[in-house]
Amino acid sequence: MVTKVKYLILGAGPSGLAFATRLKQLGETSFLLLEKESEAGGLCRSKEVDGAPLDIGGGHFLDVRKTKVVDFLFDFLPKEEWNQFDRISKIRTDRFEIDYPYEANIWQLSTDDQIRHLVSIMNSGSSRDTEMPQKFKDWIIWKLGDVIAQDYMLPYNEKIFSGIDINDLGTYWLYKLPDVSFEAILRSCLTKEPYGNIPAHACFYYPKEHGYGEVFLRVANTIKENLRLDTPVKTIDIETLTVNDEFQGEKVITTIPWHEIVSNQSIPNRIKDNIEKLKYTSVDIAYQSKNEATSAHWTYFPSKQLPYHRALYRHNFIKGAQGYWQEINAARTTDDLTIINHNKYAYPLNTIDKPQAIEEVIDWAKSKSIIGLGRWGEWVHMNSDVAVEKGMLLAESFVRS
Ligand SMILES: Cc1cc2nc3c(=O)[nH]c(=O)nc-3n(C[C@H](O)[C@H](O)[C@H](O)COP(=O)(O)OP(=O)(O)OC[C@H]3O[C@@H](n4cnc5c(N)ncnc54)[C@H](O)[C@@H]3O)c2cc1C
């Protein structure tokens, strides 16, 4: 017998959970979530390792800025159960360590290094107002100067996006990078003060007694009757909106990677081709039991000598915890690391042809009453606060229309 609901939700990560719980808050109860794992939370899940929490999808911190989202999540894990931190993060190159963000803290380097950076920034294409290049590598050098590009941005991006040629990435998403002004950096070096703002997570929350995943477990617990765990989506009949021949929705809200349903016969080849154009990278999470002598919550490692690109010192943000965990692009994982979890789908990639490919997939799906939501449904590298906000807004738009 087929279970019929108004909204069939694929995936119980932050976006699917926020959509579902917001529906319920607004009085709509005809929905069902299908999740392939035995626990909800998606990339935000945590587990206990060596006596303390560890986020198995990478380091996860709740940005304080989206107050509607933060208040929504505090309804499930109350504010008293979170610690608030001012971010301390660092970048360690082969030659030096510097506070993040790099360009704001060049003043911390030796005089020779400051001069090297200043000359490079003064001569960068963007400082000299030359034409903006189209290729990713050229763009980074044009924007930041060759020293920041070669010491940090290019090797870091080559590590985190290992497995693809970084010149296959588009430049349309790089507007997020701050401007690197020669005058502002010169002033910062002379006054020995950082300039500008930290772009994300300048201030963040992390649960006091648990990993980040706890908040989503609590969210899931409020809709447990509408949640089917250990239920991977295998097939979907596009015409009847029936999943695995078992569950049927008037609308399907999909937060799972489109690749998970690409093999379905009823998807036109044109759409399958576009799905194949959507690229992603996988991330492994490794654990190290010893503490590091650092005040940082986390450090970025552009060095190609090291397999990992980020280390998260949980002893600096979880009371009583020891050790730290590392994020490694799975294509760079080495045998000596203690891998705790493999995240097949970690980063949706901003490749040159992504915007058009995902637009065609989403438009086609919408015409079939299948709505793409969240990191994978929209193929956007978004943080969990944004995923939650999108889920909430989508539910509100349906219920109120
Ligand atoms: C390394 C890393 C660090 C990050 N750091 C932060 C941070 O500090 N702060 C922050 O806010 N965000 C951070 N994020 C982003 C955050 O993880 C995402 O924004 C968020 O998880 C997106 O939620 P989602 O529900 O859209 O996707 P996901 O969390 O990926 O959820 C998708 C769900 O679909 C399920 N699924 C997949 N295939 C199937 C199938 N066939 N059938 C059924 N279910 C399926 C998955 O199991 C999963 O539960 C980070 C991400 C990464 C990779």
Image (tube, grey):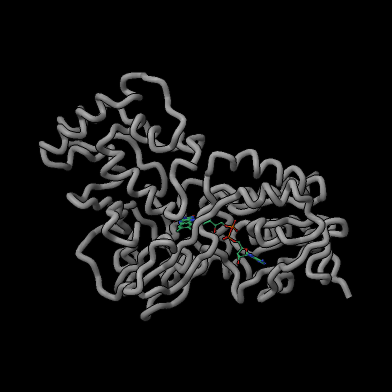
Give the quadrant of ligand 1: bottom right
Name the one closer to the observer, 93 or 304.
304
Q: What residue is shown at x 59% (from left), y 42% (from top)?
A: 354
Point out the residue furthest to the left here: 111
In this rendering, the answer to whether 390 lies above or below 32 is above
Point out the residue furthest to the top here: 129
Kindly tell me whether residue 70 is visible in this rendering.
no
- Residue 6 occupies quadrant: bottom right
Name the one closer to the observer, 126 or 133.
133
In this rendering, the answer to whether 278 lies above or below 331 is above
Q: What residue is shown at x 45% (from left), y 60% (from top)?
A: 60
Kindly tell me whether residue 103 is visible in this rendering.
yes
Q: Which quadrant is home to the N terminus? A: bottom right
- Measuring from the top left, give residue 33's x and y in whole percent: 71, 66
Q: Does residue 127 appear to the left or right of 95 in the view shown?
A: right
- Measuring from the top left, give residue 14's x and y in whole percent: 59, 59
Q: Count the marks.
A: 0
- Measuring from the top left, give residue 348's x and y in whole percent: 54, 51
In this rendering, the answer to whether 304 lies above or below 55 is above
Point out the residue furthest to the bottom here: 51
- Residue 258 occupies quadrant: bottom right
Name the one closer to the observer, 167 or 281.
167
Q: What residue is shown at x 28% (from left), y 41% (from top)?
A: 150
Q: Does residue 23 appear to the left or right of 85 in the view shown?
A: right
Q: Which quadrant is home to the C terminus? A: top right
- Measuring from the top left, give residue 369's x and y in whole percent: 81, 50
Q: What residue is shown at x 57% (from left), y 65% (from top)?
A: 42
- Residue 163 occupies quadrant: bottom left
